[in-house]
Image: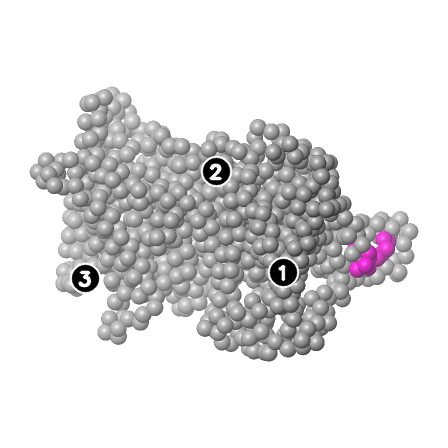
Amino acid sequence: MAALGLAASGGNWFSALALGVTLLKCLLIPTYHSTDFEVHRNWLAITHSLPVSQWYYEETSEWTLDYPPFFAWFEYALSHVAKYFDQEMLNIHNLNYASAKTLLFQRFSVIFTDILFVYAVHECCKCIDGKKAGKELTEKPKFILSVLLLWNFGLLIVDHIHFQYNGFLMGLMLLSIARLFQKRHMEGALLFAVLLHFKHIYLYIAPAYGIYLLRSYCFTANKPDGSVRWNSFNFVRLISLGLIVFLVSALSLGPFLALNQLPQVFSRLFPFKRGLCHAYWAPNFWALYNALDKVLSVIGLKLKLLDPNKIPKASMTSGLVQQFQHTVLPSVTPLATLICTLIAILPSIFCLWFKPQGPKGFLRCLILCALSSFMFGWHVHEKAILLAILPMSLLSVGKAGDASIFLILTTTGHYSLFPLLFTAPELPIKILLMLLFTVYSISSLKTLFRKEKPLFNWMETFYLLGLGPLEVFCEFVFPFTSWKLKYSFLPLLLTSAYCAVGITYAWFKLYVSVLTDPPVSKTKKQ
Amino acid sequence: MEKWYLMTTVVLIGLTVRWTVSLNSYSGAGKPPMFGDYEAQRHWQEITFNLPIKQWYFNSTDNNLLYWGLDYPPLTAYHSLLCAYVAKVINPDWIALHTSRGYESQAHKLFMRATVLIADLLIYIPAVVLYCCCLKEMSTKKKVANALCILLYPGLILIDYGHFQDRYNSVSLGFALWGVLGVSCHWDLLGSLAFCLAINYKQMELYHSLPFFCFLLGKCFKKGLKGKGFVLLVKLACTVVASFVLCWLPFVTEKEQTLQVLRRLFPVDRGLFEDKVANIWCSLSVFLKIKNILPRHTQIKISFCFTFLSLLPACIKLILQPSPKGFRYTLVTCALSFFLFSFQVHEKSILLVSLPVCLVLNEIPFMSTWFLLVSTFSMLPLLLKDDLLMPTVVTVVAFFIACATSFSIFEKTSEEELQLKSFSVSVRKYLPCFTFLPRVIQRLFLMSAITMVLLTLMTVTLDPPQKFPDLFPVLVCFVSCLKFLFFLVYFNIIIMWDSKSGRNQKKTD
């Protein structure tokens, strides 16, 4: 305790920030937790009490294991600590078991594994050369960046209230980004390969890694005009990269290959049986598409252009059905979303290949990959927006333009997470934390870039301010109106449509800035 | 203010911590037949809403005073009535006469917690923010850091949002803070009005009344009793009387009403102390059962004499040399004297000492932080009874880190920074080798921190021996009491020697 105090008093603001947020996480322990809590408890039980060969076959609970093997091993390791807390939680048949000790253990396991995230943020702060600003601590880019990452609203509510293990996974991602910035490419690649075998959602950003490592690591030199010098290809580097990926994959999937279970594992990892959108539409292109469909069908009914009997009942009564059927616009297939996603990612990949701008360019491409997949992916969760928000924080302290995009993306993205917490005691927490993060991020970045042009134009300001009335309407006015029973989906629809506009706008703006940015002139760098 | 956003952030952090703590259990949750302080609050809403004002303080078939009878001044009752009106709109069952007794539900808990947060947001937090903005000779960043530390003080948060104290402390303390603010900024009338409201909200605020009285009296003397000073005195007297009459309006018309309210407010028959309090009488009773040996009226006399004697020097000093700084320190010593020596003290009354200590946090960060930690520790038995171990530990560590980071307290232990320079100089006239004070204080802090951590660990993990079931609570109180005595001496030394150095400085100027 005294040592802790001494560390804090020695002007070490970083540890104070990290400790502060850790304490806040501890305070969030008694809050509401979603079914994900039971999911992870069930995985603990599966990995603890069954042999490896049955991990991906077990289905006593509806929450079957659907993460890659490393995550299963991670749960396995956790379960060996868990048995000292409460043996009962490791019983597969103890469905929905949530004793006080189980709660404590699970919550603390998230808080504890976040240490990796804190370390990654520390490393990121070292390698980011933000804008040179005033001497005061609170105006330093490093300070602002570490607050933006450590105190990230989305991570706080998704991990520590809703319950998931995104913290240390994001930590792995940030750490591998930091390693690439530090020119430790092999380590970066290793970390990312490991990350992929923890949670396969990170496949979204794999193209950026692949192309960047190939272009800027395997090719060691460029022509004077910036295009690739084909004869500078370094075979050893490519082979060592391949070896890393191969070894990690072998370690992860090898046992299942040996057991001849690979198809079963993959069918668990990629369940295409689910619908286009999650129960609550993630604010992406498809949310706008669905909303447009609804509006058109309502108009069509009013104008008697549509036959009411032909409209599928489910689509009109609620938006909460998993299988959403379009009435006016054509329905969307998984293949269509895949093609859309690929088309959306492609320009950024080309940009990374033909206009390499070092690690910064890679970071931009990574964010674009994450955002494009979020925009057009099949069955996207609203939480996936964090995949774009966290890396975007790194860019935000560097340039005023990026800061502006970051703020729009973050504020709308975070707001779109609000429906995750729908219980009354958590309402003040989410509003307070959101205000805390938003006020801080907007004001500190404004202070950082106060000498440049304002971060928002009138339209963007108006849009962001609109989130306030939207929240008031959805959570304070709507429940007391008579529409509550008839149109129970309305708040969710409004939220996701409104946020989708902002996120699409941010995506578009980021794309434009990446494509139009002049390549970094070599002379400037030298 | 250019850095308003930092202040906003700090306030939001304070609010978030408050709300997260309030998700935990409260006193007397699910413990019939008496429940706890939470039920008292709810019961008062029921009483004030359903009974005519004349019956609030009287025992009747509808108002059993033995079951959490109203024992706070009228302003508290009005506040209960206001809350009751809101409760009526949401769910009339919450305040139905008789049938609502012991009502508990998730929604009701949420409602009660929300009333605390709103009261806090309206009264206490603005006062703290304004106070920190009014501090002189400080950078904006320091002001913000100061506000953060005050808002994170764990004692108040845990008692108001965890335990659910008899009437929202943040309201009475907030009014008192407005009073301090007003008096220090030369808005004497507004200040005294705010302080009268504080007293009328919670009679415990009388702990603070003497410094207010002495400071204002000293101001009048300074201006000359024959001229401006007299005018000010009359104005102040009128304000105080008017505000009191206004608050007591329904009760002053009949003598019986007034007497009954007073009897309820000062229940002399409840004994020298209750439960385990970290004051002198409770600690002495480990060796000597004063409660049983001496008759009650002797106890009252003794406690009165001790209290009076211990706060006399500081008060006289304040009348003779009124200064905002001296005023703040006198507030600390007076409240501490009352807490240590007076009759019928609750363990939660330490909050009344903590508030003025928070106000001197920026002047003597090391000692203030130490005191605030001890004050929270002294309430440990109470907090453990309410199942608040986790939030207690977390908020205490958070507060400690906030103080340590924003004031770097461990580097501020020189004589000057402990405000002991003039004292040591005068002692050195007789004892030239008297240079070890800062080191001694550092050692004491270390020892105190270790005992606090150890005692907490023991209380939580060990079962007390069967012979002494109260062993740990008594130990906690005893240890805290010793520390409070040390702090009483320390703060008195500051007051006594500070004025001298102040005069010297003026001479040299």
Numbered circle sitting on residue A244 = 1
Q: Amino acid at mark 3?
A: Ser
Q: Is residue A491 above or below residue B138?
A: below
Numbered circle sitting on residue A138 = 2
Residue B21 on image: x %, y % = 45, 55
Quadrant location of the C terminus of chain A in the rendered image: top right
Closer to the camera in the image, A215 or A288: A215
Q: Are marks 1 and 3 in contact (CB under 8 Å)?
A: no
Q: Kindly identify which chain the residue marked by label 1 belongs to.
A: A
Q: Nearer the viewer, mark 3 or mark 2?
A: 2
Q: Is residue B277 above or below residue B336?
A: below
Is any part of residue B67 visible from this angle?
Answer: no
Q: Which residue is mark 3?
A: B285
Mark 2 or mark 1: name the one nearer the start of the chain: 2
Question: How far apart, in angstroms, are the residues tagged by discs 1 and 3?
Answer: 72 Å
At horizontal 34% and vertical 66% (from top left) the residue drawn is B460
